[in-house]
Image (cartoon, grey):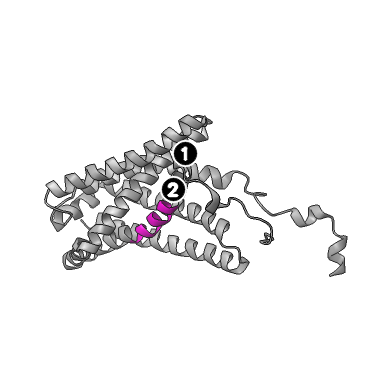
Amino acid sequence: MADTRRPLSPHLQIYKWQVQMVSSILHRATGIALAVGTVLVVAGLLHLAAGRESFDQFKNIIGNPVGEILLVGWTWALFYHLCNGIRHLVQDTGAGYAIAQFVRSSWLSVVLSLVLTAAVWAYVLTAGGAV
Amino acid sequence: MTAKDLRNPLKVARGLGSSQSGVGHWWTQRVTAAALVVLLIWFVITVLGLLHADYATALATVAKPWNALLLIVLLVTMFWHAVLGLQVVIEDYVHTRWKEVLSLVLIKFLAVLGALASVLAVLRIALTH
């Protein structure tokens, strides 16, 4: 067991915010969000298997405004964790650790995930909404 | 209790950390991640293709052999990867031992439950439609 009286690192409150730490924190946060989001996938499949009325009920739940906001959030979480996950897989080979490259790829994950989320929801909305 | 002080420090250290498992956790997390890259791109495209589809079309799509197979692979890989990730988060932030162990066991139970429930749902659809 760690002796918590020792000074613990990192001292997040004295750090200047920079994109590398944002991309790292977001990777964990979106990972946790996506683990919670698996409930939605399980619920969707169970309702689909249970029959037409049951599936309509599911569509009504995810079709309400709160449901749609959550869906947008989960879409972004998925794309962010996917983009940044690929970034980490590339870094696992030892590539991209120069500071300039590291900062650039952090921004790439953040921006690309937002672009993909916007693209998917632009498609959904032009097709007449999620449900 | 006094006997504890006579033990070689190595005896206390053995069995902790990554002994027995080595890089197993790390590697499995990467392998499931690589699989999920492909599976999730397929999943997002498939779900977007089902936008405004009626109930029968949704059932028929899941029931297609390749879709059912890929969906089951996705579900198992997804829950596996989720457990590996959540495990690291719990080990990092939960510093009370019994809470840590309880959380680690709980996420495994929930993941197995979720994986089996959703795989059974896919099988039910695939085998009856």
Q: Which mark is residue B124?
A: none
Image height of B50 relative to A112, above or below: below
Question: Residue A27: which disc?
Answer: 2
Q: For the residue carrying disc 2, how many other residues have a C-alpha within 10 Å: few (<14), some (14-19), or many (20+)?
A: many
SS label for mark 2: helix
Secondary element at image label 1: helix
- The chain identifier of the residue carrying mark 1 reads A
Mark 1 and mark 2 lie on one chain; the one further toward the N terminus is: 2
Q: Position of residue A96 (x, y in %)?
A: 49, 30
- Give the extent of the magenta segment: A29-39
Q: Look at label 2 and name its amino acid.
A: His
Q: Is residue A34 magenta?
A: yes
> Viewer-proximal residue, A129 or A46?
A129
Labels 1 and 2 in the same subunit? yes
Residue pointed to by mark 1: A88
| Mark 1–mark 2 CB contact (< 8 Å) | yes
Majority secondary structure of magenta residues: helix
Q: Does A126 sit left or right of A45 as displayed?
A: left
Q: Is residue B47 visible?
A: yes
